[in-house]
Image (cartoon, rainbow, N blue to C red):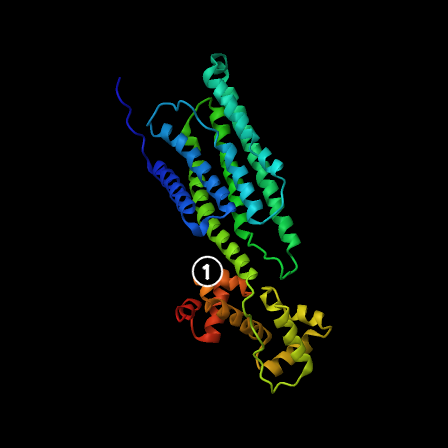
Amino acid sequence: MGTQELNFNIFNVIILLGIFQGFVFSFIVFFNKNYRVVSNYFLVGTALALSFNNLQYLIIDINLVEKLFFQIPFEFLITPMFYVFVVTYLKIEQSFKVLAFLFVPFIISLILRSLVEFISIFKDYLNILFTIEEYFSLVFSIILISIALFQIFNYEKQRKSFDIRKIKARTKWLKHILVIGIITCCSWLFAIKENIARLENDLAKYYLLWIIISILVYWIVFKGIIETRIINQRFEIRSKNFDDVTSSITSEVSNELFLEIEKTIVSEKLYVNPNLSLELIANKFDISISHLSKIINKNANQSFTDFINGLRVERAKNILSNPEFKNYTIEAIGYESGFNSKSNFYTAFKKETQNTPSAYRSKF
């Protein structure tokens, strides 16, 4: 009996690279102490489920083996793992029983596949059983993605107003991943329908699906570990009672209303709110926006934006110069100082200090 030639093409190579990066990133997260947080383990679980799912089919597609003795239904682990990551990352309270229930389809599928492999009577209905299972897995994934999106939108609604006691995690990247997840499901549905319509098991129909999954693995792990590290560092910074900013206005300023406004902004740390505006401060002190703007321009000799950014930069300088935070990311420090993006932080910081945040920290 002759040996089959390996079926390697450009699509296989791209898919293989995606699998490899999933394993490498997972290894890094498991063994790097900076990433050892509960949510990251579910992130790694998602990446590994995606990678192993692709690997099983790739082994068959490249003719490494004709058929795997037993295929594990990793497709039933992908969305549950990512859903649990979402709720732990956003610190949404959810019952352990509810989260555990998400993995029941995986266990049932595992049992059914075992029965099919070892009880010959089921083998006559193998294609029908696997088709039903694949459709159920697709529907299950779409439902979980929809629930995850609902949880994110609900979280955003609850965190719409600023609260110094709470830190709002960035959610835009999560929504991007879930949108890619929906696109993946559409590609998956197309692959299933094509194979059923032609009564064949052509794995090439799944190439687009596997390539999207390869991109998803990279995006989930790379973006996920960065965002998780930032949010956890922000919680740690917020929990420390280090010396914060003080008034930067000279004693020559005698306008009582301005001094009261500045004292309130500093003492209540309103400047940490990235969406702080003239309107919010004006409403707090029951004065018009134009009057407030004139008061700040006249007494601080700068615009409202520059005045607030000055306080934010002062907070950032205190954190950057503190050896306790020497290994914290610039992004975490910037967001925790009240800036809504890394670029805004760098621009404002350099304007105030003529240094980048990294160069400033290196002095200490």
Q: Left or right of 277: which side holds 310?
A: left
Q: Position of residue 162 (x, y in %)?
A: 64, 61
Q: Residue furthest top?
A: 121
- The residue type indicated by label 1 comes to Tyr
Q: Residue furthest bottom?
A: 252
| Residue located at (56% from left, 52% from top) | 171
Q: Position of residue 346 (x, y in %)?
A: 46, 67
| Residue located at (60% from left, 87% from top) | 252
Choose between 168 and 197: the one closer to the eye.
168
Residue topped by disc 1: 328
The total number of labels drawn is: 1
Residue 361 falls in which quadrant of the image? bottom left
Q: Secondary structure at mark 1?
A: loop
On the rendered image, what quadrant is the N terminus found in?
top left
Residue 264 falls in which quadrant of the image? bottom right
Q: Is residue 264 above or below residue 56?
A: below
Residue 281 falls in which quadrant of the image? bottom right
Q: Is residue 6 above or below residue 221?
A: above
Q: Is residue 340 visible?
A: no
Choose between 212 and 67: the one closer to the eye.
67
| Residue located at (60% from left, 74% from top) | 304
Q: Residue furthest left?
A: 2
Q: Position of residue 114 (x, y in %)?
A: 48, 21
Q: Position of residue 179 (x, y in %)?
A: 54, 44
